[in-house]
Amino acid sequence: MLVGQAVFAQNESSQNKDPKYIIDPETGKLSMVIRVWGEVKQPGVSMVPSDADLISLLSYVGGPTDRAKLNKIRIIRFNENSNEERIVYANIEAFLETGDDSFIPRIYPNDTIIVQGNFWKVFSGFMPYVTTAITLLQFYYYIQLAQRT
């Protein structure tokens, strides 16, 4: 009976531009499509079981990188849900410290999860420009020094 309902849900949603749940052709289980961007090991579109939570979802994409900012993961909802905001934040860091799952919001089909980089990601991305600028300034300094002698 559940398979019949799942197939019906898939057929019904295939007429819409925003499918909710689908049957994974590889596993035959009820699944949903999720997009994960940012500091995870395998960003992109993933098909995950319909009962996956955020921790499981991050595990499906290889987990966060060492530069991930885990205290403010942004979840953008594309399916309207009257009792939640369109943008929801999760604090995985607090969950890992306390084990309190109230820090982990529910995941819905077609959500986009964005794991931002921490300060060191921004800093390390900016460093090549600083290094180049310092090298150019040193070169200019040596030219000025050579012209004085």
Image (cartoon, rainbow, N blue to C red):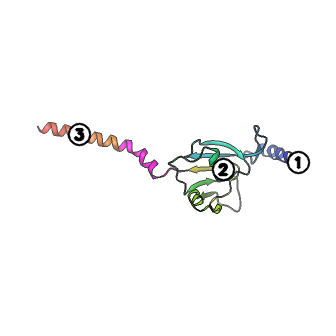
Kindly identify the amino acid type of the residue bearing the numbered disc 1.
Answer: Met
Q: Nearer the viewer, residue 18 or 67?
A: 67
Q: Which mark is residue 140?
A: 3
Q: What element does badge 3 sit on? A: helix
Q: Residue at x 73, y 45 (%)?
A: 17
Q: What element does badge 2 sit on? A: helix
Q: Nearer the viewer, mark 1 or mark 3?
A: 1
Q: Residue at x 59, y 46 (%)?
A: 63
Residue 148: quadrant of the picture: top left
Q: Which mark is residue 74?
A: none
Kindly identify the amino acid type of the residue bearing the numbered disc 2.
Answer: Ser
Query: Mark 1 or mark 3: which comes first in sequence?
Result: 1
Query: Mark 1 or mark 2: which comes first in sequence?
Result: 1
> Mark 1 — residue?
1
Kindly identify the amino acid type of the residue bearing the numbered disc 3.
Answer: Tyr
Q: CA distance from mark 1 to mark 3?
A: 77 Å
Q: What element does badge 1 sit on? A: loop
Magenta stretch in the rendered image: 116-129
**On the rendered structure, is 57 left or right of 19?**
left
Q: Are marks 1 and 3 in contact (CB under 8 Å)?
A: no
Instruction: Tell me residue 122's x, y (percent).
Output: 44, 49
Q: Residue at x 62, y 54 (%)?
A: 75
- Residue 142, placed above or below residue 83: above
Structural crowding at the residue carrying mark 3, measured as other residues with C-alpha within 10 Å and reported as few (<14), some (14–19) or many (≥20): few
Q: Nearer the viewer, mark 3 or mark 2?
A: 2
**On the rendered structure, is 8 left or right of 142?**
right
**On the rendered structure, is 133 left or right of 73?**
left
Q: Which mark is residue 56?
A: 2
Instruction: Tell me residue 19's x, y (percent).
Output: 74, 46
